[in-house]
Amino acid sequence: MEDIYGHDAYAPDEIAERVERVGMAKVRLPVIKLVALGVLAGGFIGLGAMFYTIVAADPHLSFAVERVLGGVLCNVLVCLAVWLAMAERT
């Protein structure tokens, strides 16, 4: 299948095996690391929501600027949370 899509394309049973391997690796992580990653990810998501609210409540910005700037700030912090979720590999 690699020649069809140009990247690593897996059959459904191979995908299931890979997902199971990753899941089992996460289960074996120390509890303190899981809690720390969860708290940090939740903090980033909360900061994103707070920044969006602050930008959206600013009366000096136009409607479009509020939405674009708020969306960018919120998405950047959610991306940080996703990036942090991948930190368990290290």
Image (cartoon, helix red, strand yellow):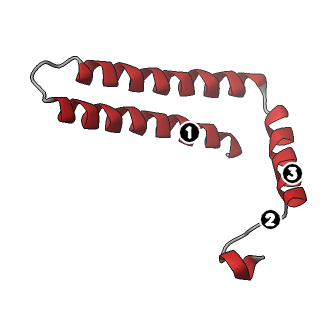
Query: Residue 16, labelled with which disc?
Result: 3
Residue mark closest to the camera, 1 vs 3: 3
Seen in the picture, residue 21 relative to 41 is either above or below; the reply is: below
Q: Which residue is mark 2?
A: 10
How many marks the image carries: the answer is 3
- Residue at 48% across, 34% down: 78
Q: Amino acid at mark 3?
A: Ala
* Local secondary structure at mark 1: helix
Q: Which residue is mark 1?
A: 82
Q: Amino acid at mark 2?
A: Tyr
Graded by Cα atoms within 10 Å as few (under 14), some (14 to 19) or many (20 or more), the crowding at tag 1 reads some
* Local secondary structure at mark 3: helix
Quick one: 70 or 89, which is closer to the camera?
70
Q: Amino acid at mark 1?
A: Val
* Local secondary structure at mark 2: loop
Graded by Cα atoms within 10 Å as few (under 14), some (14 to 19) or many (20 or more), the crowding at tag 3 reads few
38 on left or right of 28 = left
Graded by Cα atoms within 10 Å as few (under 14), some (14 to 19) or many (20 or more), the crowding at tag 2 reads few
